[in-house]
Amino acid sequence: PCYNCKCHKSLRWYGGDQASWQDLVCITCHSMYEIKTKANVEKVQACFVANKVNGGSFSRYCKLRNSLRTPDQKMFLVVLPRSHTTSPAGLKCYPVFIAEIDTVLATLGTSCCNRKKNNAHGFSFHCFLQEPGGQEVERMQMA
């Protein structure tokens, strides 16, 4: 179900090159989900502990955020491992970590000065994640 509106069977794949920041979209509340994967559950947890996750295009994020249909339309970051872990019951599982994206800020990295090393513009960004219920805001740096 959608993490925002809780509707079942409302999420649709919307991924692709022209759909960065919206791999999944809820057809009921129009919430968007950016999905990232890590090698294993330890790497997923490490990215939350270090507040650092590789992200997508900052300019596409800005265009998308500025074109939201309603002010309460939400964006979520979903991070999951590519390899399974074992549950306490001994079953193979793929735990999913999700948080609402509150704010994304661009930062200029040192790699932007080295065109040979980085063909992109060298921008990374900070993603601020909001806990369910609007409580604590957790900072996550996207690079």
Image (cartoon, rainbow, N blue to C red):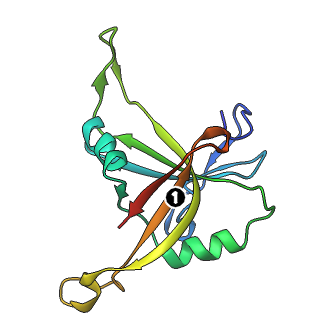
Q: For the view shown, which residue lies furthest in the top direction?
A: 89
Which amino acid type is shown beneath numbered disc 1? Answer: Phe
Going 33% across and 46% down the picture, which residue do you hit?
Answer: 49
Q: How many marks?
A: 1
Image location (x, y in percent) of residue 3: 64, 38
Going 62% across and 43% down the picture, which residue do you hit?
Answer: 135
Q: Quadrant of residue 114?
A: bottom left
What residue is shown with label 1?
A: 128
Q: For the view shown, which residue lies furthest in the left direction?
A: 116
Image location (x, y in percent) of residue 53: 36, 57
Reply above or below: 70 against 119. Answer: above
Image side of residue 111 versus residue 58, left or right: left
Image location (x, y in percent) of residue 38: 31, 47
Image side of residue 125 versus residue 47, left or right: right
Image side of residue 80 versus residue 66, left or right: left
Q: Secondary structure at mark 1?
A: strand
Give 71 or 14, whichever is nearer the viewer.
71
Q: Quadrant of the C terminus?
A: bottom left
